[in-house]
Amino acid sequence: MEPTVPCDPLLSEKSEACPLRGDWISFQLVDETGDGKPYAGLSYVLQDSSNQKYPGVLDANGAAKVINHYQGPVVLHIDAAYAGTEDFYSALAQRKSYPLPITELQVRAEKSRFVRKDGLRVENNPAKGKTNQFFHVEVSDLVKSSAHLPPISPRKHPPNFNLLKAMGDLGFGQEEAELYGLCLLPNKNTVLEVRPLRAFRPMLSKDNKFSALNLYQLSLFASLSYSNFGQAPFEKPFDTISFPLDPSVGYLFGNGLASFRETWKVNKDQTTAYYPLYEDVAYSKRFEILPFDPKLYDQNKLELGPDQDYPSKWHFFDDGEAKGGTNTQAFITHHDEVVLISVRGTAEPMDFLRDTDAEQVHFEEGVGKAHKGFYEAYKAMSEFVQTYLQQFHINQKVIICGHSLGGAIATLLAEALRRSPKKYDILLYTYGSPRAGDADFVAGAKELAHHRMVNNNDPIPSVPAPWMNTRKSIWLPGVILSFITAPVGALIFAIGLTRTGGAPYKHHGELHHFMPVHFKGRDQSSILWDPGCDSIEQAACTTALKKIEDLPDRDAFWLQAIQMGNHFMVPSYIPNSWATLRRWQQTQKTGTTIVTETEYKQVSFELQEMQIRLKDKESQLKSGDHSDRMANNQDLGALRAEIGRLNTSGERLNTLKFHNLTPEEVYGSATHAPEHELNVERWMAKKENKIEVQTAMIPKAGSSELRTA
């Protein structure tokens, strides 16, 4: 028995008083190749003009037909919840915080692939010529809740949303609280090309061993930490949010990569395109930015006032405007295998003051003492990170990166998380980081996997000096005097300086030092190595190698300190990291070594020059008039130890000359990803990466980048 149908106007007063049956509709879901099999067996619902619903299941070709529905357009939605057996999707749908409305349609679209490598739509779908109507559609067009899905991509054949809106405004059949789906015209066959749900995800190695891939990738994310989150509206959102600001953290993860665009900008003044290496993954396996949907999540409702929840509160920490804030900034995001945390470095005057507050305080989360300014900044963001991990950590690797001040804060954060009851699996990369703790802290953090990058003459890793453990008002006048009176060629351990009580400040982590080599002309390459000697490691006495046969000159630290270009990310650390990755890629592929004969000769010459200078200083100390014999003996001991370490540097350089890289040294665990070679080929296809020489030259920074530095 058919249900009673009210005799109300249908779409206008000119319509029949009572709707009539007799129309039919047929439709098919296909992928970009015209194949409907990926969508076979999907449940659907058609709703006609009298609010009659026709549930069904797509056939083996992703098609369906309904005969004798009430006259007029029909609305199609495919909104059945995922009921499959894959734990990954079930976990997303059932998690405590922000459970996602995963549909079977979404899962099917995530398993389809783009025909074009760039993700742009194909011009002519084979199914287009076999139908009356053809539309480009997205999963979000067919489901009720879509805030967790990507922004709509440009399309040449969009559905008729004006008709759907008109039907909703006029009251489509019986009153509907919400009308959603696609509007299809009757007595026609319609083909719907469903856009694949794929995303780009930065490739990362989860191996604790150093890799050139992580070196480069994390240099980009360390730089991104200086950007805003980019959410609009910034606060008090009502129904939707967006991420229009490029570059920003929100734009990169919530817009660009989610929409399968190879975004490259991580700094607003960046002019050189540094593309991350991306892998093509199912959309749900991207780095996630949480959805905002007040209809689905009560915590998103505007009426909550200051307690209202939205993405920037979860993903972005910035206490610069807070009363008593530390001006610390960081972002956090995750996917099913990695949680990524990046901490901003020195950016404002308050950050410089924090850098110089060298008083040592107890590191409550572990052993030893920490730099007071860095520790306070870590404490400020600790709850933010812990809250996120409590909700979204499911045994992923936690990868943390930071530049400058951010590197020191990241070091304290990483060790605290490693020692927490959950014992997170931590991997840390820092760039130009100052010392964060004393020798006891470093000894206690021995098991923390930390790769520490220093670029040539970057002075920031040399502070706080080992002897600094008092407030800046006490040590600052003395340190200035020490730098000014230091002779040319002075050693970083600063003979004659003293420390007052407690263990000395010490660097944590495995050093990777960028040592530039200049060639004739303006070109220069960069060797990444651990030289093993204070004269190079601490950056205060390192200078770039000059042109062939030119003698290197050495400035005192106070002169080198003003050469801050070595410290910044976009002009220095990122180009050096890119050049290292390209060098390692090429030498691994060709079976050659990562140090050329020319570079080997120049660096060997530099090491010999260092030894000559130190031996000259040793002779001066031996022959001088010494009122303090004990202090003189200490200075002589320090000089002789450094001369011995320079011998170690020579041995390490010799090892590099004969070392052949493995793929794992270049890409780490990412080497074994299912589509690793395709992902690398995509990156190599960029014109910026097509350098076919063993010595990948360091790109020169653009003028705007240098001005920013």
Image (cartoon, helix red, strand yellow):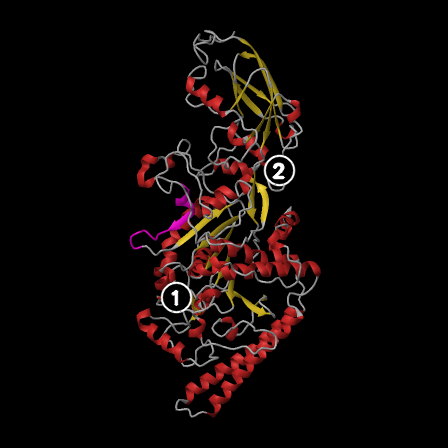
The one of 77 and 555 positioned closer to us in this rendering? 555
| Type of amino acid under label 2 | Phe
Which residue has dot 2 on it? 114
| Type of amino acid under label 1 | Lys
Which residue has dot 1 on it? 369
| Residue 313 on the magenta span | yes
**From what the image shows, is residue 303 above or below residue 635?**
above
Residue 687 seen in the figure: yes
What segment is highlighted magenta in the picture? 310-324
Q: x, y percentage for residue 422?
A: 46, 51
Residue at 48% of width from left, 56% of height from top?
401
The one of 316 and 609 positioned closer to us in this rendering? 609
Q: Determine which of the numbered discs, if any, sits on residue 200 in the image.
A: none
Residue 471 seen in the figure: no
Q: x, y percentage for residue 561?
A: 43, 70
Question: Rounded to the nearest whole Å, what is the CA distance between mark 1 and mark 2?
Answer: 53 Å
